[in-house]
Amino acid sequence: MLRIRSYSLLLTFVFALSAAAQRISNFSVSQNGNVVTYRFLYTAGSTCQGYQLLHSSDSLTYLTVQDYAGICGASGAAEPFDGVHEFPVQNAWNYYKVQLATFEQSEVRRIFVSSDGKLRATIFPNPSFSDADQLRFRLGGGNNIRVQGFVYDQLGIAREFIDTVTTADSAPLNLVNYENGFYLLWLTDGTRIYTGRIVLIR
């Protein structure tokens, strides 16, 4: 009985500590030219002794690419932080997370970095073989953003206007009753442009 009670108290302590330690919020990454810009919010509460930006090219092994040695949260209010990773891997997926000196880590964010500045919109499933397919598009680094644009057919004619907000980095794409063929998805968030090719074989 004593052992069960001790175990219960330990779990309560661990969960309380974990809940109190969640200080990183709104972590996002975006491509700006050939570099990657990151942003996050350190929520109000206790201070921290700096943070590190961790980077990976395979989502498994992470290396420190930014090391901020200052104090976070000294103002007693939520504080925004941002910075730049100057040497991401070009034409490939890059993975990032923030780690505090207390070892708390943010969620992982990934972004496809293109050397020509064009960002990829990934459509899935693609090709689409049925009107019943629930098409979606994913934007590398486009986390919870509003995008607008068009779906163009093979002749360059705009077939549909898109105005939506991504959940995480994806959103649904309704192309029911479209003819078979190739289409181009063109989207912008006002700063960046995303493009992707769609193939319909129905």
Image: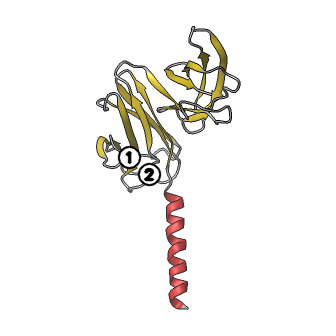
**What x and y, as percent, mark residue 52?**
34, 45
The 10 Å Cα crowd at callout 2, few under 14, some 14 to 19, many 20 or more, is: some
Residue shown at the point (69%, 27%) measured from the top left = 176
Compared to residue 74, the image places residue 166 above or below, namely above
Residue shown at the point (37%, 24%) measured from the top left = 114
The 10 Å Cα crowd at callout 1, few under 14, some 14 to 19, many 20 or more, is: few
Compared to residue 159, the image places residue 202 above or below, namely below
Residue 47 shown left or right of residue 9 in the figure: left
Residue shown at the point (31%, 44%) measured from the top left = 69
Q: Nearer the viewer, residue 122 or 100?
A: 122
Residue 47 badge: 2
Q: Given the current orientation, which residue lies at the most extreme bottom position?
A: 1
Amino acid carrying label 1: it is Ile
Residue shown at the point (51%, 83%) measured from the top left = 6
Q: Nearer the viewer, residue 114 or 127?
A: 127
As helix, strand or loop, the secondary structure at mark 2 comes to: loop
**What x and y, as percent, mark residue 182?**
55, 19
Q: Nearer the viewer, residue 186 or 111?
A: 186
Q: Quadrant of the C terminus?
A: top right
Q: Are marks 2 and 1 in contact (CB under 8 Å)?
A: yes
Disc 2 to disc 1, how far (Cα)? Answer: 7 Å
Residue 98 badge: none
Task: Give the mark count.
Answer: 2
The earlier-in-sequence mark between 2 and 1 is 2
Residue annotated with mark 1: 71
User: How is the structure coloured here?
Assistant: secondary structure
Q: Nearer the viewer, residue 89 or 103?
A: 89
Amino acid carrying label 2: it is Thr
**What x and y, as percent, mark residue 9?**
53, 78
